[in-house]
Image (cartoon, helix red, strand yellow):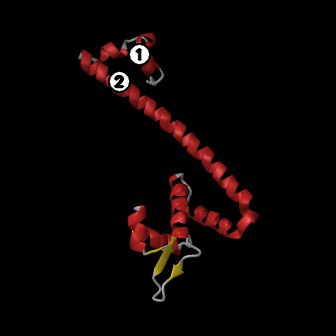
Amino acid sequence: MYYSIGEVSRRTGIPISTLRYYDKEGLFPSMERSNGGIRVFSDTEIEIIGIIECLKASGVPIKDIKQYLDWCEEGDSSLQKRRDMFYERLQVVTKQMEDLQNTLSTIKYKCWYYDMALAAGSENVVKNTPMEDLPEEIQRYKHG
């Protein structure tokens, strides 16, 4: 199936200008063009967009995404490099998620803290509550 740039933009939520930028950067090596030079996206480009967005979301710069796509074009000779890249991303994203989980825990604790302080009419009541008197699900969130 083939799609116009506008259809791809609507389907993916990616602005047309970004899709043009990706093309200019060589991220769609096999993309066809109509007789008038208009970009014609296929399911292959849609799949590539998914990988681009995944890698971008994990912090990979466009030049490294281009390198990955070049490796894909090389075929089996680059399997190890591609595998290594995704294992490295796995480590990075896992660490980011752990950090976000810690942030979420602190936010949950602070929500509880301020709910209790408002209910009591004072922060002092909550500040002076010994750890063992906190609800069990809140104890693991307390970070200060």
The spot of residue 17 in percent (x, y) is 41, 71
Residue drawn 41% across and 16% down?
135
Q: Is residue 10 left or right of residue 84?
A: left
The image shows residue 132, relative to residue 97, as above or below, that is: above
The spot of residue 44 in percent (x, y) is 55, 69
What residue does disc 2 label? 112
Q: Earlier in the sequence, mark 1 or mark 2?
A: 2
**Label 2 crowd (10 A; few <14 / some 14-19 / many >=20):** some
Q: Is residue 14 visible?
A: no
> Is disc 1 in contact with disc 2, using a CB cutoff of under 8 Å?
yes
Q: Quadrant of residue 16?
A: bottom left
Total number of numbered discs in the rendering:
2
Determine the residue located farthest toward the front in the rendered image. Answer: 1
Residue drawn 60% across and 62% down?
64
**Residue situated in front as seen by the camera: 33 or 137:** 33
What residue does disc 1 label? 135
Q: Amino acid at mark 1?
A: Pro
